[in-house]
Every structure is written in C-alpha cells, then in structure tokens.
Amino acid sequence: MFNAPLIALALCSLIATTSVAAASKYDSEVSAWKTYEDVAKWLKTNFVFDRNRQAQALAQLRQVGPNGALTRRPEALFEQRRGYCRDAAGFAKDALNRINPEHQARYVFIKNKYGPPNHWVTGFNVNGKLYVIDYGSGNHWKAMEGVHGPYESLENYKEFLASLSIRNFDPELVTWRDIEGQED
C-alpha cells in the first residue's frame, strides 16, 4: 500500500528541490545584471500585478496586523512573476543591493490619504542622489510606475507623486520604513 511517511518525505524533497532551483535561477540571473536599469527592465517585462495577491495580503494584514503581512521572497517572485507592491519592492531591494551594495536600497512606505491600499516602493542611491523604482503599482496607479529621480529627498519624491492625477490617491506620508511581516 502507501507509505505515508515516505510520501511526505518525497513531497518535502520535491518542494526543497524546486525552491533551490528557483533560488539558483534567480542568483544566476541577478549576477549578470550590472545596473538598476537591468532590475527595472526585468520588472517591467516580467512582473504582473496580482489583485488577488493584494487582496490576500490586505486580509492577512487586517486579521493579524503588521507582523502577519506578506512579502514574497525575491526568488519566489522571480519564479512566479506575480505579486503586489510589497513583493515588487522586496525584489527590487534585494536585486539592487546584490548588484551594488552602495545603492543602499531600502523600502519606502507611501501612506495614501484616502486609506488602504497604501503603497511600497524601493528607494536607492546613485552618485549621492535618491532614485525610486516602482513596478508594483496596479492598473489604477500606473502613472507611478517606473524609475524616478534623481531627488534630493523623499519629500521631493512625495511632491512628484502629489503631481500625478490618480483617482483615490494622495500621498499623505512618504517615509523610509522596514517591512514587518512574513516572507512567503
């Protein structure tokens, strides 16, 4: 008949092997990238905003609070190519810092004056100037998409965001912030 422990072990091994393969593909791809434009190009060409993922993440956030919020591991995003803003921001942060630690890529939190959804992007340095990479916006916030900068400060980036005509969006707060929660 069936040997349940053996089947469970085989499934765990398959999942671990798939995870290692995804990480290996991601590591290999990112090691070939030389500039932030390479990260932007990959996200623009491959990343698809997933409203269901966003809804799942918002529900988890409401249920459990910030410690339960979801952010997809960069390797998993590379493999699945779908997610929401936190997933894209995490991917960009990781890839930028691998390419050049001097980028000092960090998360930027954008609090929407009209309430959730809020937004996450990645800020980074190039020659002492601030740039922002954002490929995690949904269709309604497409005007935010791209690489923006150079800026002197996050306040300048906030001014740029405020100049966009986006329905139900007004940047109340734009700040550096570490992401709490769980990777999946």
Image (tube, rainbow, N blue to C red):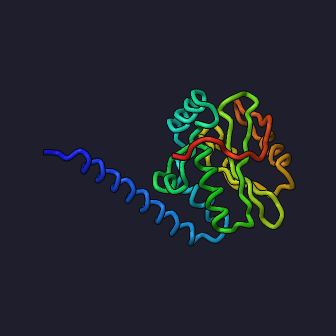
Residue 61 pos. (x, y %): 60, 32
Q: Residue at x 81, y 43 (%)?
A: 158
- Which quadrant of the view contains residue 177? top right
In this rendered view, identify the residue nearer to me: 121 or 184. Answer: 184
Q: Relative to 103, is 161 above or below?
A: above
Q: Residue at x 62, y 31 (%)?
A: 65
Is 111 on the left-hand or right-hand side of 27?
right
- Which quadrant of the view contains residue 54? top right
Q: Residue at x 26, y 47 (%)?
A: 5
Is 114 on the left-hand or right-hand side of 28?
right
Residue 53 pos. (x, y %): 51, 38
Q: Residue at x 62, y 45 (%)?
A: 86
Q: Relative to 46, is 118 above or below?
A: above
Q: Identify the residue at the far left of this view.
A: 1
In this rendered view, identify the residue nearer to me: 171 or 179. Answer: 179
Q: Relative to 122, is 26 above or below?
A: below
Residue 7 pos. (x, y %): 25, 49
- Which quadrant of the view contains residue 43? bottom right
Residue 140 pos. (x, y %): 63, 37
